[in-house]
Image (cartoon, rainbow, N blue to C red):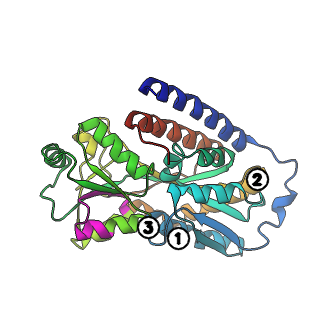
Amino acid sequence: MTDSNRSSIQRVKWRVIAASLAAQALWLSPSSAAAENYPTRPVRFIVPSLPGGGADIVARALSLKVAEQFGQQVVVDNRAGATGTIALELAASAMPDGHTIVFLNGSATAGSTLQRTAQVALTRLTPVTQLTEQPFIMLVSNSLPVKTPAQLIAYAKERPGVLAYGSNGVGGMQHLAWALFQQRTGIDMLHVPYKSGAQILTDLGAGQIQVGFTNPIAARPHINAGRLRGIGVTTLKRVQSLPELPAVAETVPGYQATNWYGVAAPPALPTAITRVLHQAFSAALNSPDVRKWLEREGSEVRASSSTEFGIKVAAEAKRWGDVVARSRIDLY
């Protein structure tokens, strides 16, 4: 298949996803009665990562705040694997009563570009809200003699296929962010997929791999302790809370690969319950302690509407689908 054909297929695919997500976001419930006593039991919060990663940390912090509002537990259910596909499919098949919700991130959406079942599940979910947006920090092992993105590019060009980078799975956000980086710089590195960001950090610290991307919340303790070296952020401009780290775009103009977190629910969730969930997570995000913590760690709080979040997910899937096509990453 030619690159042109791949790109055409991806464009058509993500136009369909955009239309479907917009329809889910605008779906109207005939009655708000279902929301009057919601929730009536603990809420299951499916998270597509192992415990200890950035997504898990944020999900658990917010679940406590939402539980206080609901008077019911919000129970985090870690379902890592298949770059978020397992979590997406579980959420898409659950009852649309608000007692099962799912934590979405950039990796789950990017991963859906490679997995048909994940694409179907993603289009069926009811968007609730985008929680945050944050950069990845470009990390290197202390054994690697580079301190800037420019030095990394030069070092890698002299050693094609030698440096190994870790990601959270084939087609995940970190994988595609590195694929885009290689496309833009002309370097060639070895991809090593992991099940979680925590495992990437462990192997980076041990020198088993040389470079990786992870979110600021997970990266900062390792940088502060001197176990790893941060050399850049993947936003277009420097991050206010991380001023010492240059934007990769200062070396590679236009390069951007931000991660984001959000909440979605099973298909056909009544609008009234979607509204309750949106209000609860918005309140949790804007509680002074949570907001201060997130912003200190490099995240921007969003709390977008259901419709806005549906459009965001579709746009991200389209963008990373194009990267998949250009990189010729195979379906798994």
Residues at marks 3 and 1 touching, judged by CB atoms closer than 8 Å: no
Does residue 73 appear to the left or right of 250 in the view shown? right
Q: Residue at x 68, y 38 (%)?
A: 20
- Mark 1 = which residue? 61
- Mark 2 = which residue? 269
Q: CA distance from mark 3 to mark 1?
A: 12 Å
Instruction: Residue 64: tell me if it is visible.
Output: yes
In the displayed image of the protein, which residue is found farthest to the top? 4
Residue 234 lies, with reference to residue 210, above or below; the image says: above
Q: In the image shown, does 189 or 147 lie closer to the viewer?
A: 189
Kindly identify the amino acid type of the residue bearing the numbered disc 1.
Ala
Q: CA distance from mark 3 to mark 2?
A: 28 Å
Q: Position of residue 125 (x, y in %)?
A: 67, 49
Please report the bounds of the magenta region as a residue range.
Answer: 202-216
Closer to the N terminus: mark 3 or mark 2? 3
Q: Position of residue 281 (x, y in %)?
A: 61, 61
Q: Position of residue 253 (x, y in %)?
A: 27, 35
Q: CA distance from mark 1 to mark 2?
A: 24 Å
Does residue 211 appear to the left or right of 143 in the view shown? right
Which disc is residue 53 wearing?
A: 3
Q: Secondary structure at mark 1?
A: helix
Q: Residues within 10 Å of mark 1 (few under 14, many from 20)?
A: few
User: Would you identify the image quadrant in which residue 88 lies?
Assistant: bottom right
Does residue 268 appear to the left or right of 265 in the view shown? right
Q: In the image shown, does 170 or 78 lie closer to the viewer?
A: 170
Closer to the N terminus: mark 3 or mark 1? 3
Kindly identify the amino acid type of the residue bearing the numbered disc 3.
Gly
Q: Residues within 10 Å of mark 3 (few under 14, many from 20)?
A: some
Q: Residue at x 44, y 72 (%)?
A: 52
Residue 20 lies, with reference to residue 29, above or below; the image says: above
